[in-house]
Amino acid sequence: MDFEMRIDEELSLTLIQPKDAEELFALIEANREHLTPWLPWPATIQTVEDERRFAESVVAEHAAGRIVPCLIRRLGRIVGGMGLVIARRRLGAFEQASADIGYWLVASEQGRGVITRAAAALLDHGFGELGLRRITIRAEPLNRRSRAVPERLGFVHEGTLRGAGWQDGRRVDHELYAMLAEDWPAARTAYHAMRFQTNREPAGPPGR
Ligand SMILES: CC(C)(COP(=O)(O)OP(=O)(O)OC[C@H]1O[C@@H](n2cnc3c(N)ncnc32)[C@H](O)[C@@H]1OP(=O)(O)O)[C@@H](O)C(=O)NCCC(=O)NCCS
């Protein structure tokens, strides 16, 4: 299934496909030092074939309604990944679905709001089309850049999940941030009213 969610004039989300494996693998190779301290999965991707198998598995999980595995594209080129992992609680006819958002970005694209803008679009999709009630983001206590994303979007910091992650062969804590469906409209308005300065624009020529 193909899917493209336009975020704004430069950003879009598309579903991960096996045909993206080569481009993705090259990005992971070039960004290993940047990603490995914070994410457990880059170590499991050592060849293009590993990436292709990963893409095939997430396509199947998406078809089953368990995840929404996206690539982030800036001006058409892949610059990172972002996904929803959905948890459904069913009791007879009652069903309530929530999800966790995960993300990564190539080092050279940091500081432009790519992740925050993409996360806001995925929140719209999650609370809208997917009917989710609650969306969470988790980050290690020292991952300042990652924690800043839910903070910028008005998530509530609910606490610390002790030993909830696994990094470098050891358990690590996760800070838990959550947004409820009913709180998103006001948080969304507040986020879109913020004025950001992108600190990654090329500097002007010397002397100007
Ligand atoms: C975590 C990570 C994705 C954050 O990337 P990031 O570039 O800092 O986050 P964003 O893309 O949302 O950019 C935010 C920055 O852009 C600025 N910005 C500009 N325009 C913006 C806009 N429209 N909206 C939001 N922020 C904007 C913000 O002020 C902020 O600047 P700052 O870095 O000077 O504070 C990235 O550091 C990364 O991939 N790290 C390694 C992997 C990782 O940790 N993944 C998460 C595991 S929990």
Image (cartoon, grey):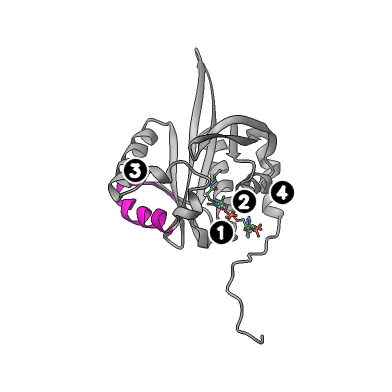
Which stretch did the figure color magenta? 14-30
The quarter of the picture where residue 54 lies is top left
The quadrant of the picture occupied by the N terminus is top left
Contact between marks 2 and 1 (CB within 8 A): the answer is yes
For the view shown, which residue lies furthest in the top direction?
92
Residue placed under numbered mark 4 in the picture:
190
Q: Secondary structure at mark 4?
A: helix
User: Disc 1 beta carbon < 8 A from ligand 1?
Assistant: yes
Among numbered discs 4 and 3, the one appearing first in the sequence? 3
**Disc 2 residue type (three-letter):** Arg
**Disc 4 residue type (three-letter):** Ala
**Crowd tier of the residue under label 3, counting other residues whose Cα lies within 10 Å: few below 14, some 14–19, many 20 or above:** many
Say if 142 sits above or below 164 in the image.
below
Which marked residue is nearer to the observer: mark 2 or mark 3? 2
Say if 197 sits above or below 72 in the image.
below
Q: Main secondary structure of the magenta part?
A: helix
Structural distance between the alpha carbons of marks 2 and 1? 9 Å
Q: Nearest the camera: 127 or 154?
A: 154
Structural distance between the alpha carbons of marks 1 and 3? 24 Å
Contact between marks 2 and 4 (CB within 8 A): the answer is no
Residue placed under numbered mark 3 in the picture:
55
Residue at (34, 48) in percent of width and height: 46
